[in-house]
Every structure is written in structure tokens, then in C-alpha cells.
């Protein structure tokens, strides 16, 4: 049999009707409606005396659906416009531009408040309660974990506030906060490319906004994690002050610079004091040890109760080491925490779990964060707000509707299997039927997903 026999008699025409591409993305739009997100954002963007043809909240939610579906440019809204037989009227690209241009800082704050109200409803609907943050084959119980981190987004043209970055590239340096329990991108702020990695004011702003996103009933015990960029007196003092709020306890686990004083303290630690570190499964981490050096440092001026814990590890081949590390063959990292109890190895594993934020950043860059469409900083900030909505929708989809392999699928796999599924639209008895191909490998899972979304109770 010839290898090309499959294409014999095959022709391609452009006259198909009743066929819907990316039919699974309609589930995300339905989720936005059932969760109350569309209504809340619409109310936040409503203006007296202004009745647009396309409701601005609906337009922004559609942009979020487009980004979650893999869109990279405003013109990609046409994929949703193709689905008008299912979705109804969808705004054009020029209308999307106008909508983003109308999002002033005051309106963006209203959107943040709307997201917080919807998040409270979504979290109240979680079938098994709020997921626990996992650490070393264990979990942190009811602790809500916030991971703050910044990333570089390269700009390939001269855009407003794009600037040389500390990595030698050119672009922006946005800062965000993710909830480790749910993978939600709670807050993201666009910053110029030359914004400082450890700017205390920026960290305090996004952390304050992130805490405001958490439903009040879940703010009783928080854990804030960050790399060394968060290790400033101002940030740690601010976090310490939050422990004065009645009914709230805030732990932090922040990367701490390995300075000369820390190196001197490390030299004073006897070999018998080092204990084995833990790996992600809770077992002994080969070649890794942990020790506390708090009592060997002068921490006057730092918040009371702060501890400094150091991890040493045999470096992998080719790792860049300092002269100090080259001398004894260990690679050192340190972090500061105010958690007073718990085994050192567990506290270190808890801090190392902050690395999961790199996956969150990668996912966000795959859904809007990786490319900004405008020369104007304000429009790009609005685009980033749509990116946070897209991240919310994907996270809520996982929490409320996905099970089995779909629940843990990477974003690209989720699109390939669910969001990009084709379907045929038929009508009978005054009803529309979206028919997923019976041969689609995940057809039964997808039908169940739509049913679960449709069953979500509307907010009161």
C-alpha cells in the first residue's frame, strides 16, 4: 500500500456549515457566566449614560477566554467571532482595542474588587474545600500560600516603558502573586523593564492586593514565599505588622542573601549539626543538608523572631560557584522565616516549594503574559488584567469541573484535548445541540465538564 493512499480523493473546500472549531472554549465562557465573573466585571465597568453595543464586561471576559484558548493578539478574537452561532455576538478587534483603552487605573481597581467577590463564591463551591499546599509528601493544611515573583517579558519593538533588563534583554518586568493552593494568579502589575527586582514598595503593593483577593474566612493563616528579591527590611517589617491583625497569622519564607557574614556563620557550624534535607516525596535528599545559623548572626534591625536557615548541596557538574563554595565543594542557599516550630528539613522543603511559581509563570506566559500587544503602557496594563482573568478561569475550570488526567494536564495539553475540540451545531425542538465527535478520545470527559459547569449555582 502506498504511504499517500490516505489522501486519494481528498479535497478541501471552504463551504462547511454548522461546524464549530475550539468548541471546548465555550465551556470557559459558560464558567465565567455561571461563576458570576461576567456580571461582576460588567457592573464594575458600567458607566452612567454610556450604553455600548457590546457590554464592556462581556468583551473583557471574551478576551480572557481567547487568551486561555491560546490567542496571542487582539485579532485572535475572530476565533470567538467564528463561534457566534453558539456564543452570540462577539466584539470585533477594534472594539476590543477600545475596551482595553478605556480601562483606567480606577477601573482596573474595580475589576480587582469584582474578581475578589467572584473568588469568594468560587471558593465556597469547591467540592472538597480549599486544596492544601503540598510539601514533601505532606501538606500545610488550611494555610493559604502566596508566592510572589517577577519575570522578564521581552519586547521586540520600542514600547512605552520597555527598557533594558538586568538580564541584558529589553522589555518589561511584571510582578505577580500566585496562590499555590489553587494556582490562581491573584495579582499582576506591569512594570518597566528596568524596575528593581527587590523594590520593596512594589512587593508590598502586590502582596496587599493579593491578600485582598483572598476571602476573609481564609485569611486566618497565610504563608508568604519569595526569593531573595523579597528580602528587605521594609517587606519583612510589613509582613510582621500583619501579625498584629486580630485573628490573622502570617508566616513568611523569603530567600536571604548569602553575604560574607552568612559565610562566616556557615564556617562555624560543626558537621554534626547539619541534618539531611528532604526531597519532594518526603525522603532524604541525596547530597543536601540543612542547618540554622540564626544564633551566629547579628540580626538586630531585622524583625523579632526572624530565623535564618541554610541549605548546602553538592553542585551539579558545570554549576557556577563562588570562591567560598569552590573551597569546600558545597553550594549554599539561605532563607529567612518567622516560623518558630517544625523540623528544619521540613521548613526548608516548604521554602523550596516556592519553585513551583516558575511553572505558574510559564503557564501565564502561555496565556497572555508572554506578549503585550500595544505601544501604550496603559493598554498593556489592561491586557495584563485580562491575563489574570484568563488564569482565574483556567484555575476554576480545574477546581470545579475537571477530573482525572484533564485536571492535571498542562495548558497546551488542555487546549489540545478540551478547548480545541471541534463540534457540530444542530437545532431541534427550539434547542441548540453542540455535538462533540463520538470518536474524540476525551468525548465523555468533555461532556461531563460542560454538565458540571452548568450545575454551578449562580451567586446570590
Image: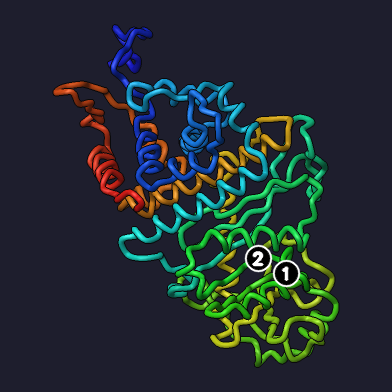
Q: Secondary structure at mark 1?
A: helix
Of the 4 image quadrants, the one containing the N terminus is top left
- 1 vs 2, front mark: 1
* Tag 1 residue: 235
Asked if the residue under mark 2 is in contact with the one under mark 1, i.e. CB atoms within 8 Å, the reply is yes
Comparing 444 with 204, the one in front is 204
Q: Does residue 284 sit above or below 35 in this rendering? A: below
Q: Residue at x 55, y 67 (%)?
A: 353
Q: Residue furthest front?
A: 49
**Where in the figure is residue 23, as x and y percent of width and height?**
35, 30
To which quarter of the image does residue 291 belong? bottom right
Furthest residue to the left? 429
Q: Which residue is mark 2?
A: 226
**Colour mapping used in the image:** rainbow
Where's residue 11, x and y in %? 34, 7
Q: Is residue 139 visible?
A: no
Relative to 16, is 322 on the left or the right? right
Identify the element where label 2 is drawn: strand
Q: Is residue 39 left or right of residue 72?
A: left
Q: State the image coordinates of residue 96 (x, y, percent, origin top left).
A: 56, 27
In which image quadrant can residue 238 be found? Answer: bottom right
Amino acid at each position: 500500500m502506498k504511504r499517500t493512499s490516505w489522501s486519494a480523493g481528498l479535497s478541501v473546500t471552504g463551504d462547511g456549515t454548522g461546524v464549530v472549531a475550539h468548541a471546548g472554549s465555550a465551556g470557559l465562557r459558560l464558567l465565567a457566566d455561571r461563576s458570576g465573573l461576567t456580571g461582576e466585571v460588567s457592573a464594575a465597568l458600567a458607566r452612567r449614560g454610556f450604553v455600548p453595543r457590546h457590554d464592556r464586561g462581556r468583551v473583557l471576559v471574551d478576551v480572557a477566554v481567547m487568551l486561555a484558548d491560546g490567542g496571542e493578539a487582539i485579532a485572535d478574537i475572530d476565533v470567538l467571532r467564528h463561534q457566534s452561532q453558539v456564543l452570540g455576538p462577539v466584539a470585533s478587534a477594534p472594539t476590543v482595542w477600545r475596551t482595553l483603552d478605556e480601562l483606567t487605573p480606577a477601573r482596573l481597581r474595580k475589576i480587582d474588587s469584582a474578581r475578589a467577590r467572584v473568588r469568594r463564591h468560587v471558593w465556597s463551591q469547591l467540592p472538597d474545600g480549599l486544596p492544601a499546599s503540598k510539601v514533601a509528601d505532606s501538606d500545610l493544611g488550611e494555610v493559604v500560600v502566596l508566592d510572589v515573583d517577577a519575570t522578564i517579558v521581552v519586547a521586540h519593538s520600542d514600547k512605552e516603558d520597555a527598557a533594558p533588563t538586568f538580564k541584558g534583554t529589553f522589555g518589561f518586568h511584571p510582578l505577580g502573586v500566585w496562590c499555590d493552593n489553587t494556582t490562581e494568579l491573584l495579582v499582576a502589575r506591569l512594570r518597566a523593564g528596568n524596575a528593581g527586582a527587590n523594590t520593596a514598595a512594589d512587593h508590598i503593593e502586590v502582596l496587599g492586593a493579593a491578600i485582598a483577593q483572598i476571602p476573609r474566612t481564609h485569611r486566618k493563616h497565610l504563608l508568604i514565599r519569595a526569593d531573595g528579591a523579597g528580602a528587605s527590611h521594609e517587606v519583612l517589617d510589613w509582613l510582621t505588622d500583619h501579625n498584629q491583625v486580630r485573628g490573622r497569622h502570617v508566616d513568611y519564607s523569603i530567600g536571604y542573601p548569602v553575604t560574607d557574614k552568612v559565610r562566616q556563620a556557615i564556617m562555624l557550624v560543626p558537621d554534626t549539626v547539619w541534618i539531611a534535607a528532604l526531597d519532594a516525596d518526603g525522603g532524604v535528599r541525596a547530597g543536601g543538608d540543612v542547618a540554622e545559623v540564626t544564633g551566629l548572626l547579628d540580626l538586630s534591625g531585622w524583625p523579632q523572631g526572624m530565623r535564618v536557615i541554610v541549605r548546602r548541596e553538592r553542585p551539579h557538574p558545570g554549576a557556577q560557584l563562588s570562591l567560598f563554595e569552590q573551597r569546600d565543594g558545597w553550594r549554599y542557599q539561605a532563607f529567612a522565616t518567622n516560623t518558630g516550630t517544625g523540623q528544619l528539613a521540613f521548613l526548608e522543603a516548604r521554602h523550596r516549594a516556592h519553585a513551583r511559581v516558575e511553572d505558574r509563570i510559564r503557564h501565564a506566559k502561555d496565556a497572555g503574559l508572554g506578549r503585550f500587544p500595544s505601544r501604550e503602557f496603559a493598554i498593556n496594563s489592561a491586557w495584563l488584567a485580562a491575563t489574570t482573568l484568563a488564569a482565574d478561569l483556567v484555575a476554576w475550570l480545574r477546581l470545579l469541573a475537571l477530573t482525572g488526567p484533564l485536571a492535571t494536564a498542562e495548558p497546551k495539553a488542555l487546549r489540545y484535548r478540551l478547548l480545541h475540540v471541534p463540534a457540530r451545531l444542530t437545532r431541534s425542538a427550539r434547542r441548540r445541540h453542540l455535538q462533540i465527535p463520538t470518536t474524540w478520545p476525551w468525548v465523555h470527559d468533555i461532556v461531563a465538564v460542560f454538565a458540571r459547569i452548568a450545575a454551578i449555582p449562580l451567586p446570590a
